[in-house]
Amino acid sequence: MLGDFKVRAVDASARLGELETRSGTLRTPIFLPVYNPNKPYVTPKEMRDMGADAIFTNSYIIWRSRWLRDVALEEGVHKLLGFDGVVFTDSGAYQIYRFGSIEVTNVEMLKFQHAIGADVASIVDIPMAAGISREEALRGVAVTLRSAREWRSIRDELEGTLWIGTPQGSSHWDLIEFTAREMSALNFDYYGAGSLKVALETYDFEVQVDLLLKIRKWIPSGRPLHFWGIGLPAVLALYTALGADSFDSASYALYAEGDRYMTVHGTIELGELDEFPCTCPVCSKWSPNELSSLPKPERVRLLSKHNLYTLLSEIKLIREAIRGQWLWELVQQRVRAHPRLLAALKRAFEGYGELLEEREPITKSHGLFYSGPETALRPEVVRASKMLSRVSSGRRFKHPLYGVVPLGLRYTYPFGQTHMPGWTEPSEEPTDAEIILHTIQFFYGREAQHAFASPRLTRSKATGMPRDVYDGDVRVGSIRPADGMFIPSLEGAKRLASVLPWPRGRVVVRERYAEKVARGTTVFVKFVKTADPHIRPGSEVLVVDEQDRVLAVGKALLSAREYRSFTRHAFVRIRHHVLPREPQEGD
């Protein structure tokens, strides 16, 4: 359905998402090159051929040119640009930042963007630099909110276009919070974070981190978040890990105009290069000397293409890092491109750890690689260290990152999957009882130790690793070899529910959906009455009805802190259910 945002995979605070637009599905995270019809260094068709699935263009520039405006209104912005992917349009807000005003109203620009067929469009807000006076920021906030409310009043006339609302307020954080709350209530399809222009230009990454995370805190998690004007390859991984879903910039062309060559480690003056550290089509064909000798228009065109290849390649790598759940490792590599980037990462960890933890998966398919002292501040490391207090006394070992760890968690994520130089695993092996009791307490709390009267394990004959968990002769679950996580069976779930305080470990389903879930239907967000607030993506949960009867067990796909802001989205994928599935037609 148009405007639906689905999360397909998560790592850190990043999402592999899919947004339905009228031109097709937009996959996030994504970098959108800004195309200026007045500076066509790389054409939209070339961008598409290079792998750009979506682009940004400025509808105000189109509106100001009679010829461009007439073609766009008659044939649509996609045909005007020669681009068959998703097209985002800016409203002219950037021109307000540059020149102070534009000669068209917000309502006129809203209707124009809709009329030319923009897939995702924006209101005329007031972008702000960091550090402006409170009075100036207040004036900008007032105009931004007026534009947002004008959009809301005519939204029904603009059906088919998705709309971005961007909270403003400069670096006055109370104004950012106020604007974000007000705009959240208006229910935009997409939200934005402005890049605070002066901060962007001076590499003040810490202020940008503050802005992004403060806005993220107050907008609905069920909508994608765009970070305006971000076009340095080295920063994309960090801002994606902090929760940004898309970025736009004309940096690929602006840097080329200054003979600046982009890499993921920073930019290099073209004249300083003896050879290109890249194998893109431009760098494979030309040497730095050859490129430098070309007339400037051709040199800028080719350098723009290389720079865009670098940005598009980096965002593809970021998507792979999310799929493989090694995004923080990539971030920790990239932030070492500049000391201020590393400081910004530490600022995020130290100032926003609780917010970042809310979206962090409870377990991952990739090991945790120590990548520097800031590894100790990563959300999953801090969370795991705190969760150790759930486990009752027993034999323990000392870990340099987590402190004193119960021996039964030796093979459990993240303790058994953390790789550190100089770290030697403990020589002692946990007993079966230690593995079972420590693991279920770690995930469900200390009360879980009373769930099973006579717990025992079976082990793999090939590897000796734990497999099925029994309470006497009754199978109550299993220990997953890859991450040491306890996967309850239906009987195990019932015994856990009998000892865990409500709603610990539970997703509670509304009565009218209970039978559907009991027969194996995925738990969608609208089915849910309440849930344990500590549930995170990847948590193994007990699905119960309003009388606390176990209906199913399954894996959470979203955080319990965020699921209510999604519509038509799955929350729990069912593993086992108490009733047989409904017979299908023809069975």
Image (cartoon, rainbow, N blue to C red):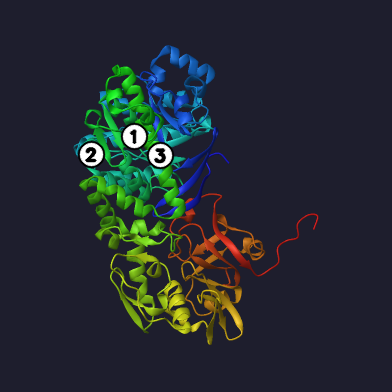
Evaluate if marks 2 and 3 touch, with contact meaning CB atoms under 8 Å apart: no
Which of pointers 3 and 1 lies earlier in the amino acid sequence? Answer: 1
User: Residue 266: in sight, yes or no?
Assistant: yes
Q: Is residue 10 above or below residue 291?
A: below
Residue 249 x %, y %: 35, 32
- Report the front residue among 463 and 157: 463
Task: Identify the image quadrant of residue 533.
Answer: bottom left
| Residue, far top | 67
**Up-down relation of residue 547 to residue 120 (above or below):** below
Front-lying residue, 62 or 294: 294
Label 3: few (<14), some (14–19) or many (≥20) C-alpha neighbours in 10 Å: some
Left or right of 250 in this view: 555: right
Q: Amino acid at mark 3?
A: Ser
Tell me the mark number nearer the camera, choosing from 2 and 3: 3
Residue type highlighted by circle 1: Thr
Q: Quadrant of the N terminus?
A: top right
Residue drawn 48% across the image and 82% down it: 432
The residue tagged with tag 2: helix, strand or loop? helix
Give the spatial CA distance, label 2 vs label 1. 21 Å
Q: Nearer the viewer, mark 2 or mark 1?
A: 2
The answer to whether 520 is drawn above or below residue 429 in the figure is: above
Mark 2 or mark 1, earlier in chain: 1
Name the outermost residue toward the right. 586
List the residue tagged with mark 3: 313
What separation in Å lies between label 3 and label 1 (alpha carbons)? 35 Å
Number of the front mark, 3 or 1: 3
- Amino acid type indicated by mark 2: Ala
Reading the image, the residue beneath label 2 is 199
At 73% from the left and 61% from the top, the residue drawn is 582
Q: Quadrant of the C terminus?
A: bottom right
